[in-house]
Image (cartoon, rainbow, N blue to C red):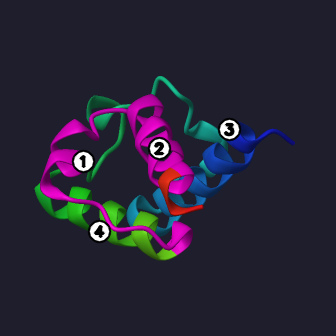
């Protein structure tokens, strides 16, 4: 499993925890328009789950950029690479 596959799997788990949706329905193309409950409160719940899952801190700019799963994976990948 590549790093990106691992991160996507964990992001899917965060979506399950935040929005109670089947992780298999979450793809890189998934965005707020595709997920019921992905509003401002859901966004903060997702961010908290991602921070806990990956042991990272997301700042305001990260939160503003998190508009799709593809972008979330990119942000998490960048954060993890700086953490090492």
Q: Secondary structure at mark 2?
A: helix
Region of the chain picked out in magenta, as a range: 53-81
For numbered disc 4, what is the local secondary structure? helix
Q: Which residue is mark 1?
A: 62
Q: Nearer the viewer, mark 1 or mark 2?
A: 2
* The image quarter in which residue 71 lies: top left
* Residue that mark 3 sits on: 4
Disc 2: which residue: 78
Sequence order check, earlier mark of 1 and 4: 4
**Between discs 1 and 2, the one toward the N terminus:** 1
In the image, residue 22 sits, relative to residue 75, either above or below, namely below
Residue 84 lies, in percent from the top left, at 60, 61
Distance from the alpha carbon under mark 3 to that under mark 1: 18 Å
Local secondary structure at mark 3: helix
- Check disc 4 and report the residue beneath it: 45
Q: Is residue 39 left or right of residue 80?
A: left
Residue 12 highlighted magenta (yes or no): no
Magenta segment's dominant SS is helix
The residue at 35%/41% (across/down) is: 35
Instruction: Name the residue: 44% across, 64% down.
Output: 50
Q: Closer to us: mark 4 or mark 3?
A: 3
Q: Quadrant of the N terminus?
A: top right
Q: Determine the CA span between mark 2 and mark 4.
A: 21 Å
Residue at x 46% of width, y 30% of height: 70
Q: Nearer the viewer, mark 2 or mark 4?
A: 2
Between residue 29 and residue 56, name the one nearer to us: 56
> How many residues crowd around disc 3 within 10 Å: few (fewer than 14), some, or many (20 or more)?
few
Q: Does label 3 or label 2 sit earlier along the sequence?
A: 3
- The residue at the far right in this view is 1
Mark closer to the observer (3, 2): 2
């Amino acid at each position: 499993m590549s790093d990106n596959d691992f991160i996507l799997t964990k992001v899917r788990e965060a979506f399950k925890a935040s929005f109670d949706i089947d992780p298999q329905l979450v793809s890189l193309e998934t965005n707020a328009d595709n997920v019921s409950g992905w509003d401002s409160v859901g966004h903060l719940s997702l961010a908290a789950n991602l921070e806990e899952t990956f042991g990272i801190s997301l700042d305001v700019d990260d939160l503003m950029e998190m508009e799709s799963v593809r972008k979330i994976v990119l942000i998490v990948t960048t954060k993890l690479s700086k953490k090492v």
